[in-house]
Image: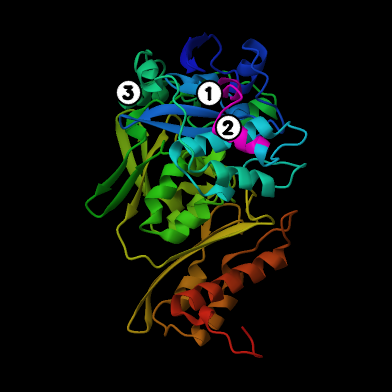
Amino acid sequence: MVEFVLNGQVVKAADPSMTLLDFLRLEQGLTGTKEGCNEGDCGACTVQVAALEGGELVHRAVNSCILLLGQMQGKSVTTVEALGGDHPVQTAMVKHHGSQCGFCTPGIVMSLTAAHKEGRQDHTDVLAGNLCRCTGYAPILRAAEAVAKAPVPAGPNEAALISALSSAGFTELDKFANWYAENPDATLVSGATEVGLVLTKELKQPEKLAFINQIKALQNIEHEIGGMRIGAGVLLARVRGAMAGKYPQFAEMLRRFGSVQVRNSATIGGNIANGSPIADTPPALIALEASISLRKGDTRREIPLEDFYVSYGVQDRAAGEFIESVFIPEQADTLGVYKISKRFDQDISALCGAFNIAVIDGTVTKARIAFGGMAATPKRAKAVEAVLIGQPWNAATIEAAQAAFTKDYTPMSDQRGSAAYRMILVQNLLKRYYMEQTGTDRVRVVGGPL
């Protein structure tokens, strides 16, 4: 039995594998929340979820269509019905003509309501996960700007309501580790941005689900001697915050990872364990020499992230073994990260690349380059690295290294780009990185080449 707060009232649900959207519409009659794409892209199903994090109540906008009820245990869900029609966001949307057909409007209102509650003013980022065919976004953005300084209306004491709820499912890491070692066929659910699609698009029902999003030990970000350790259950929204001060280009790339709603649900461990060759976090992590801690029962092992990926769809992970954490060694920031996609916001990468090159006294002393979308797994460009190391950091060395990409990769052609296009991209991205690191990207001769 799942127990959570819905619009200020405690509710219980029997089926933890049911999506939150279906529960709201079919069992609670809360039809203001709409079903659009049913895959976490359009934002029409956006609701606000509050949870206690480190003793503080944090509100996040999420896609209810790919979240499962089992993930709602001990949380508070707010839908558009609870706003009552006179919330400052709703008033601003009416005043600035931010709605036409209205189908997407409840989701937009809930995205802006969550942002308003948390004091966010990066409105274009907030709305990147809400698609609207009718209005264009100008009147919606005007509404967002108008309401930014309005006071947040008082609501139910969500913290007290949540604190009174019982815990359910897995909350202790050791207990889960031992259980999973004995039940390796279970499907792990933390963010559910992939598992949700299995249910809604593939119409498959995993036989055994293990909800691990309540295990606090998987949600820590710790600064250890020699580096940073990130729990596998840390939301990508929090990873982005942790990267902002240390590796800003990594954080900037994460701004384009899905949408606010997706980053508020997806976890770093899930993105790694999924094993997709176009996952966005592995190239940057590999370039940063990250390692992962794998655990089975009481046994742990630490391996370089790049060694985790064996071949397409195959990872170095034994049955009953799971990713417990990611470790990034302390280092100077020389990281460049580039996501290439057809759309700027909310699009799957054609490729994503990361460069981490150290230069001392004009000579390259270290080079780590990794790409997703260029091979069957996220993969380093070791031939390119070999050309760079020990050579002067100049345009001639970059040109020689560009040619070596053909030794590292034999990319495929698909709907996101041809093999030739991808090869040109990686070569040009190395040059872009060089120009950014040396400052030559800011020099332009009038009438001459960039």
Task: Determine the CA span between mark 1 and mark 3.
Answer: 27 Å
Rendered residue at 26%/48% (across/down): 223
Residue 358: x and y in percent read 37, 72
Q: Is residue 398 above or below residue 377?
A: below
Using the rendered image of the protein, determine whether residue 40 is visible from the camera's viewpoint.
no
Which residue does the numbered mark 1 point to in the structure image?
78
Q: Which residue is mark 2?
A: 110
Snapshot quadrant of residue 419: bottom right
Marks 3 and 2, how far apart in space?
32 Å
Query: What residue does disc 3 label?
Result: 172
The answer to whether residue 257 is above or below residue 359 is above
Q: Earlier in the sequence, mark 3 or mark 2?
A: 2
Q: Which residues are magenta?
A: 80-94
* Res 18 quadrant in image: top right
Q: Quadrant of the C terminus?
A: bottom right
Disc 2 and disc 1: Cα gap in Å? 8 Å
- Disc 3 marks a residue whose amino acid type is Glu
Residue 216, position as x, y percentages in the image: 34, 30
Disc 3 crowd, CA 10 A, few/some/many (<14, 14-19, 20+): some
Exactly how many numbered labels are in the figure?
Answer: 3
Specify the amino acid type for callout 1: Thr
Label 2: element kind? helix
Residue 139, above or below 355? above
Mark toward the start of the polypeptide (1 vs 3): 1
* Percent position of residue 32, x then y: 66, 22
209 displayed left or right of 351 = left
Q: Which residue is rendered at x = 51% and y = 85% of the image? A: 395
